[in-house]
Image (cartoon, rainbow, N blue to C red):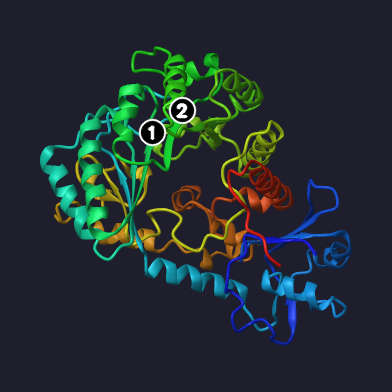
Amino acid sequence: MGTTVGRVPGWTDGIVGAPGWVVSRYNTFTESGLPGTWLGFNAFTGALLELEEEDWRRVAPLDGRTGSPAPGNLPAELERRLQAAGMLVPATFDERKALFEVRRRALDAPDALLLTLAPTIQCNFRCTYCFESHRQEVMTPETEAQLLRFIADKAEGARAITTTWFGGEPLLQPEVVERVQRFTNALGEARGLQIKRGIVTNGYFLDPPMVERLQALGDWEMVQVTLDGLPEVHDTRRVLMGGQPTWARIVRNCRSALDAGFPVDLRVNVDRRNASALPQLLDRLTCEGLLPGAKISIGFVVAATSTCSHVADQALADEERARLSTWFDAELLRRGFLPPGGLPAPLCGPMCSVESPLGYVVAPSGLLFKCWNQIDGTVEQAIGHVSGAATPNAARERARWARYDPAGRSGCSNCSALPVCMGGCPWEYERLGRVHRGECDPFRFFPKELVTLAHGRLRAARATRLAPVHSGS
């Protein structure tokens, strides 16, 4: 009969057994890379069915038949599995309405304080595509004290605190990182809160003594370091203030961090200038000993702010980005590396600090913003200050982000990829100025390929015991 993985428990409570079942609008049916196995995936429930040939022949005709009545000749057990996975839904069940209701409830009752913290806007790099202006701004002791009070106040009633250290280059001010993180750790322990830690660093200062200091602060969920290609490419894009190269030192630091058991999440910022060299980069990073120990993913250079508007001609379009990211994950799997992530997950909570009432981006000045693209913004763009002092346009800025709602955009609300991206990045939606759709997720363009890849990753993880897959009927 096959297995079911990734199912959202209990979503069918009170629904299974209802009359008049139809085909879900969020299904993807495809072959797998495993002989004798076919796949069905539902983006709303996150359920993935492994199907044997006999059941696949019965299920394949459902592909693309959104809203059509369920076939009347399905075996009872197969029909039950399709209903439990959300691939068949009652004719009276409005999936879009239910999806937006789940989203609304999650946004109205956030349980995690999401903090993006910049101890400085200063940076020792001058990356050619950076969206920041790098003012000489450092968090003062007074602002730091105000920040601690702000965290304690906003964490009241939360179940978790996520701190993501950002900049500028946050490790230019490691003492601030240590003091604030220790305070947050102690607050979490005193109140029984889960603490998640992350940092976005250029890696230049991530030497063994710095790694030891960070490890003393607890386990880290994410340590993002960017390498933009082979040395001859990276060292023209991610350079020191004086133009000096940075590749060799970053690689050396990442290797020693991995040797010390510290996580490294490599990111490659891709545009038209370096996309074609990704295979050679993977070869080199393997030879350097960074793969497979580090995680690796690609991001994309975009003209996010006026500061980096000059990169617009080099940026890839939505479908180009989707094709490249799909290829990249397939290439990782082909090489025996596990791509980051897994199944295209239904996104039912806030995607970032913009959407969460408990989401804040804290500048070194203490100004509060909603999006980290505003990290070097002005007081006119702020929603407040950690001290509690008013800012002139706080109401306007809060209202600006509250207007972000994919339910009101026909292109997003009618898209079969909606549960996976919920309209995409709010900043990009506003920047792109599209009326009917936001930033499109790769799942919109290549759903079958991405489901097949996710299944391959799950199988590989099961085989290596890195991420066990739970199965059931």
Q: Position of residue 214 (x, y in %)?
A: 31, 33
Q: What residue does disc 2 label?
A: 258
Q: Is residue 137 visible?
A: no
449 lies left or right of 297: right
Can you name the residue that lies furthest to the bottom here? 19
Q: Find residue 359 and report its image quarter.
A: bottom left
Which numbered dot is residue 338? none
Q: Amino acid at mark 1?
A: Thr
Instruction: Give the class, few, some or many, for how many residues have Cα within 10 Å of label 1's Cα (few <14, many ≥20).
Output: few
Q: How many numbered marks, from 0 up? A: 2
Which element is circle 2 on? helix
State which tag comes first along the sequence, 1 or 2.
2
Q: Is residue 304 visible?
A: yes
Q: Residue at 69% across / 38% down in the picture?
A: 330
Quadrant showing the C terminus: bottom right
Q: Is residue 460 above or below residue 49?
A: above
Q: Residue at 22% across / 56% down in the picture?
A: 190
Quadrant showing the N terminus: bottom right
Q: Position of residue 53 (x, y in %)?
A: 87, 59
264 lies left or right of 340: left
Q: Find residue 222 and report its image quarter.
A: top left
Which numbered dot is residue 307? 1
Instruction: Name the residue nearer the viewer: 180 or 420.
Output: 180
Q: Position of residue 468 (x, y in %)?
A: 60, 50
Instruction: Name the residue nearer the viewer: 275 or 246.
Output: 246
